[in-house]
Image (cartoon, helix red, strand yellow):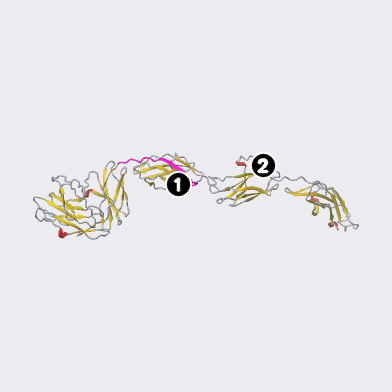
Amino acid sequence: MKAIFINLVALAASALAQYQVNSADAQYVVNGNEGTPTELAITALGVGDAPVLSIRTASSTPRTATLYMGGATTVTPSAGGLVLPDGQIVNLEIGTVLPTPVASVGATTTPITFVGPVIALDLRTRIATQVIVENPTTPIGFSLSGPSELHICGLSPTNLIATPGQTSVRLDWTIRDPNEIGGRVARLDPGEDPNVFSNWDNVGGNLVAGTTSFVVSGLMAGATYRFKVRSIVPCGYTPFSSAVVVNVSCSTPTAPTGLNATATGFSSVALTWQDLATNETGYRVSRLDPGEDPNIQANWDQVGGAVSLPAGTQGLNDFGLQPNSTYLYRVRAENFCGFSSFSNYATVTTPCVSPTPPTNFAAASVGSTSMNLVWTDLATDEVEYRVSQLDPGEDPGNPQLWDNIGGALPPNSTTLAVTGLQPGQTYRFRVRAIGVFNSTCPAPQVGPLLVTTATCPPAPPAPFNCVATRQGNTPAVDPILVTWSYSGPPISGFRVSRLPPGGDENDPNAWNNVGGDLAPTTFSFTDTAATGLTRGGTWNYRVRAFIDGPCGRIYSAHSNSDPANP
């Protein structure tokens, strides 16, 4: 018996390692006779992977192949032979335990396990693979198929994980090859032989570059499937990943627990919970806004958008809330089977935010009917100021009785003039800065400030002894001298009035002021305007005192009137 020697020789170090089949060294001698070649191919996988030997027979008669494996010139025989099925390719991966061989119809076979050393395939190793085919009656030979240069065509994907659903499976994997331009998923249906290449069905066609997950749907519940994936690279396909076995059975995730909500600002909340599930694909958090009915599902808004949170998530920050408002939260896990039950409810109230209240609230220039209210503006975020007033005798505890005065004062206001008050009355005033969130977080009132308007002094006593005398002996030429007396508290001045002949003394509109306001120390007035007055008529004069103060001008009663004939 002689052997076929196939030597793989490393060429040069590069990102894409190449191995050349030395056909000059290849020998195919069976039972001492050179037979007609059929097929023999060597496939080199990624660096660090074991090479794969593919053998195909052209005969309908089962053949037995004995595989020898080794590195350099060392050859280690395997434990026995392998029956080659009729017209099928059998892949023998060096360094692994071979599955039970697939025999053709009518063939009698004994399962044989090949055990050999793992040969690290790198750029410094010379691999020698020997195949001996034994058949006592019919010679058979082998030849090389494929190109003379066999490439390491990319790195296979790894970390293939299968997550079952009710009638689907989600596959997730890691791409290793940096030159990946796509991918393919293969499925083995229940009961089929994984060693028969044609049993593996491609699902999904060619996946786009960068795809690391794929959902295979339309599966039978309770059935067991196998899946494997490989990458598409510029030189072709990488080897397949390791296969995963998954049973299409479904259970919803375990519900999360310990949901806690903490206000982190006037418009934000931090949520945390315990992830107890092991088969979830994500989490969904929902929020109930203030005042809404928790029993109406449409009232619950999903936090974070329509996409669920990643599996394993245990927290979320919620923004854009209203201050001084109470919110309710809940969370649940989900997977392909559906949703878990909801967690516990978590309630949180956001803090209040409002402008800084003003200080130094006081009244200035207090009169009997008016005053100025002043304050210090400390706020930087107010949108307006508002002042309210409570009239004398009203209940300060009744908010409906406080009247807004002055309307909406602009930001940075520090004063307001108040008019229309009553003398000697006590009024209450309040002021506050209004912020953006005043509806949910009203600013505090400053006050009340109690202010009593000025009381009016009594009217001064009337002057007396009013005497009007023509000065000189020339009628209609000489002026009229008016004198009077006064006895009483200090006053602001006097006013003299004159009634023309025929005027009604009781009609105040008939009297005309002459001389304007006179000093409080003046007790006489010369009416020079009397020059030219009509002769023969009687002109009457009278005087009254006045006080100017917070209540305005207060007059005394008129003195006696005294006639004079110009």
**Mark 2 residue type:** Pro
From the viewer's perspective, is 334 left or right of 520?
Answer: left
Quarter of the image containing the C terminus?
Answer: bottom right
Q: Position of residue 204 (x, y in %)?
A: 29, 51
Circle 1 residue:
318
Residue plotted at (63% across, 51% down)? 415
Q: Tell me where residue 533 sits by quadrant.
A: bottom right
Residue 262 included in the magenta stretch of the image: yes
Q: Position of residue 183 (x, y in %)?
A: 29, 53
The residue segment tinted magenta is: 249-269
Circle 2 residue:
392
Label 2: how many Cα within 10 Å (few below 14, some 14–19, many 20+): some
Q: Number of labelled discs?
A: 2
From the viewer's perspective, is 251 left or right of 358?
Answer: left
Give 153 or 396, whichever is nearer the viewer: 153
Tell me, for residue 96, which label it has, or none. Answer: none
The earlier-in-sequence mark between 1 and 2 is: 1
Q: Look at discs 1 and 2 and give the one toward the viewer.
A: 1
Q: Position of residue 527 (x, y in %)?
A: 84, 55
Label 1: how many Cα within 10 Å (few below 14, some 14–19, many 20+): some
Whether residue 527 is visible: yes
From the viewer's perspective, is 157 left or right of 434?
Answer: left
**Mark 1 residue type:** Asp
Whether residue 299 is visible: no
Question: In this rendering, is residue 252 above or below 180?
Answer: above
Give 316 or 59, whichever is nearer the viewer: 316
